[in-house]
Image (spheres, rainbow, N blue to C red):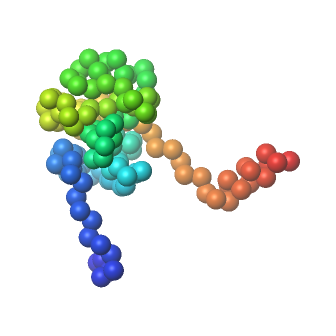
């Protein structure tokens, strides 16, 4: 039950694109730097962005070794101009809907080229410990 003080969250404007993923048992989502991170199969699979370019579309977390094969397979996908380690499908692309749906299908099939293992969050205590070791 939500408290009366909590604002109800509006669905992300691109959430329709990932609807098929939401039916998967291990799917979860969370806010990430003003975007919407989608996790499946234990990996950060996709990030929805609805801001100004180049943050308006589908970010595809992947390893650089897979960039070429993904860009060849999915029309409109290119390297993100800021996060060069990831790929990007701009919502302005003529092929956004078809390519986005095909990418979501690949994620559902557990295409190992798409998605990255989330980094472990370090606790404040371990960060302080590391910081004090560096000073010594």
Q: In the rendered image, which quarter is residue 82 located in?
A: top left
From this viewpoint, is residue 40 visible?
no
Coordinates of residue 94 in the picture (x, y in percent)? 14, 29
Which of the pair 39/74 is nearer the observer? Answer: 74
Confirm whether residue 95 shows in the render. Answer: yes
Residue 32 position within the rendered picture, expressed as x and y whole percent measured from the top left: 40, 51
Q: Is residue 61 above or below residue 40?
A: above
Q: Is residue 49 left or right of residue 134?
A: left
Left or right position of 81 against 10: right
- The quadrant holding residue 115 is top left
Which of the 4 image quarters holds residue 106? top left
Q: Residue at x 71, y 56 (%)?
A: 128
Residue 9 lies, with reference to residue 108, above or below; the image says: below
Residue 29: image location, x then y, percent: 33, 53
Q: 128 left or right of 69?
A: right
Q: Farthest residue in the right direction?
A: 136
**Where 122 sits versus 6, above or below?**
above
Number of dots carrying numbers: 0
**Image coordinates for residue 30, horizontal then vertical, percent:** 36, 55
Q: In the current view of this chain or complex, which residue is farthest to the bottom? A: 4
The residue sitting at 36% across, 26% down in the picture is 79
**Residue placed at 38% from the left, 22% from the top?**
66
Residue drawn at the location 28% of the way across and 41% of the way down: 56
Q: Observer-nearest residue: 60 or 117?
A: 60
Image quarter where the N terminus lies is bottom left
């Amino acid at each position: 039950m939500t408290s009366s003080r909590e604002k109800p969250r509006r669905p992300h404007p691109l959430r329709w694109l990932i609807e098929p993923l939401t039916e998967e048992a291990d799917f979860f989502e969370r806010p990430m730097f003003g975007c919407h991170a989608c996790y499946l199969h234990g990996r950060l699979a996709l990030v929805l962005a609805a801001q100004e370019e180049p943050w308006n579309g589908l970010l595809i977390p992947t390893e650089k070794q897979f960039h070429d094969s993904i860009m060849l397979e999915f029309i409109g996908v290119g390297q993100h101009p800021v996060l060069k380690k990831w790929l990007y499908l701009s919502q302005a692309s003529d092929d956004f809907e078809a390519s986005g749906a095909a990418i979501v299908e690949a994620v559902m099939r557990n295409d190992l080229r798409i998605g990255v293992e989330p980094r472990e969050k370090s606790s404040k205590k371990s960060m302080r410990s590391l910081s004090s070791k560096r000073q010594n």
